Amino acid sequence: MSSYAETLAENVEEQAESEDSAPETREKPEDSSDSVDELTLVEAICDGLYTEMSQDERVMALGEDIGRNGGVFRATDALYEEFGEHRVVDTPLAESGIIGASIGLGLSGMRPVAEIQFMGFLYPGFDQLVSQASRIRSRSHSQLSAPIVVRMPYGGGIRAPEHHSESKEAFFVHEPGLKVVTPSTPYDAKGLLTAAIRDPDPVIFLEPKLIYRAFREEVPQESYEIELGEASIRREGSDVSVFTWGAMTRPSLIAAEELAEDGIDCEVVDLRSLSPLDIDTIVDSFEKTGRGVVVHEAPKTGGLGAEIAATIQEEAMLHQEAPVKRIGGYDAHIPLHALEDYYLPQAVRIQDGIHDVMEF
Amino acid sequence: MIHAQSGLHEQDEHDRLQILDADGNVHPHATVPDLSDEEMLAMYEALVLARQFDQRAISLQRQGRIATYAPMTGQEGSQVATSYALDEQDWLFPTYRDHAAKHVHGRSLSSLLAPLRGHREGYAIPDDVNVMPEYIPIATQIPQAMGMAWGYKLQEQNDRAVLCHFGDGATSEGDFHEGINFAGVFDVPAVFVCNNNQWAISTPRERQTKSETLASKADAYGVDSIRVDGLDPLAVYQATRAAIRKAKDPGPGESRPTLIESIQYRFGAHTTSDDPSVYRPEDEPEYYRKRDPVDRLRGYLESEDILTDERQAAIDSRVEDRIEAAIDEAESLEADPDDIFNHVYDEMSDRLKTQRDELRELREKYGDDAFSEVLE
């Protein structure tokens, strides 16, 4: 485990011990079974699928190489053996087919969980998502819906080939009718996935593959939900609010610990839900600190940082003591891996940006 | 199907064009392509090079010297032969697995390794080379190749054709169907080579489509098709050469585009990140392994006394030297962080210039080591 992962893991443990400070981030299952497993994030996703499929026969998984192969990242490992080829389905190589079929399966009463192998391969299915899945409820006045989950690994940092490292969450957040979530811990991965599967509307479930196996955490065997639309405060602080999600939560927490040594007390807010955004938590945090930084992997221009900064401007301007700083990817395609480390926000860039905001 | 007037014959019990049998003997009624001894040897040397390159690349990946690599062993015979069938002015649209096809049509070996070491300049195309940067999202190249072929036809550049590679899985994507349909409607000088290696990662060919053959998909669009033994370099050469000729100069009643289903087998993994033992039996490829394209062409050339031990030794030595030199060259490339911002637009936007300058300042202030902390 890297020191970054340790910091995050410790942080999560502290939260678990102190229910009062952040009760919403650590919901205990109602059936308070003590059975837990130490899981990585990708294992927790697999466990979440397993738990829901065990309890609800309508839930099925479909995608490329998810069956016998267990998924290229093993996110569906052993599900094929457990549930069989009709509930864990290897499809032909066709993303539009996978998402369109999922919408139809949903209309028939099934609860499909589609896997797109990498976010960069989604686009043949984009039309089905934005022209169809997102609109079926409004077109039918809620008579119909698309109760589907579309899972996809996203983000950089794993020295992958071209088209395997993008972070395009803003496309989906921009589309009314879609929900968008991304976990930064194994516990959240299972809880958010469970909630996504049970949600009556289409949910884009973004998986930060950089931290698929970065660290382990206790994950209950029982099912539990983390409500969609609720952010989690990963570190409480009083000087500046850092809003982030997914794999960028780790370097943000590292930066926060480094800055604590300089006397800067950062609050780190893991949004978890990108659509809908937890406006209350964002605004409350900002009103407390008066300073804000947004950290994301995606290109800065048109990224979600702009939405958060604008929301703060609208909702909390009178508390504002400095411009909201956006620390993102640059407005260029994420480079091949020789330059990837310069493109993605690193703790050093985050620290530098926070210093800017503090010194304004 | 293309029939006798195009010079292509189906003469094998498996309903695919074959010239060499499993041991490299010429089938009794087959005609060997009209290639000189030197041309045959050059094609063979390219095959040996491809096989060696593939093995070295896998080993470099294991050593951490290159990133994820898509092996081509078993498929290099078809790659080499299709590119040999091209004329210099023809364009090639390769996928991420078509290393040998790219090299034979003009890409340097070091340029193949550069992206695998994280350097985008490996995708840049020298002025005198007509090879597109590789396509990774499946089937996306097919409508584009059609469009380029269409454009040359509209501009009456009738000596140009376009050859487009893709795999069996690609035939399930919408772009395949749209591209082939357009090719039929606009009668474009394009050759579509479906490298049917039987496996789309873990999905076997018979679960990819209920169609009996992939070639038959062209029938739906009124496009000619042929099935060829993709492990027989001479058969692939003959089929491709005939298709290229027909694309540029169709006879009376002939149309220009052709779909070639090149029947192959992926001897190894999908990529170095893949473990095929999870989804396919080890002994499955026996039929194909006995028809190894390198062994077959060697068998033929030896039986014709075109290839001697002395020539083989010279080939082996040249191949080794060329691969070593390519690795050295690729490993000497250095990354410049400014390059992140270059080539996004014809003219760099003001905001990109600002971002480039911000990164320069951060590097100056904290040093380059500070940028490799999180990800390593």
Image (tube, coloured by chain):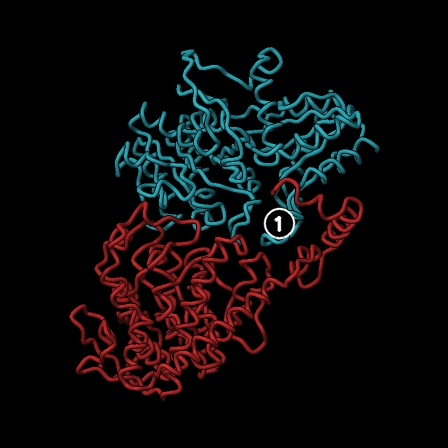
Horizontal side of residue B123 vs B159, given as left or right: right
Chain containing the residue with disc 1: A
**In this orientation, which residue lies closer to the viewer: A179 or B366?**
B366
Q: Is residue B16 visible?
A: yes
Farthest-out residue, left: B13
Whole-percent x, y for residue A209 in the image: 51, 40
Which chain appears cyan? A
Whole-percent x, y for residue B189 in the image: 40, 76
Considering the image in quadrants, where does the N terminus of chain A appear?
Answer: top right
Which chain appears red? B
Whole-percent x, y for residue A307 in the image: 65, 36
User: Which amino acid, by three-letter code, is at mark 1?
Assistant: Glu
Horizontal side of residue A86 vs B309, given as left or right: left
Figure check: A18 above or below B290 = above
Q: Residue at x 58, y 54 (%)?
A: A336
Residue for badge 1: A340
Horizontal side of residue B354 vs A159, given as left or right: right
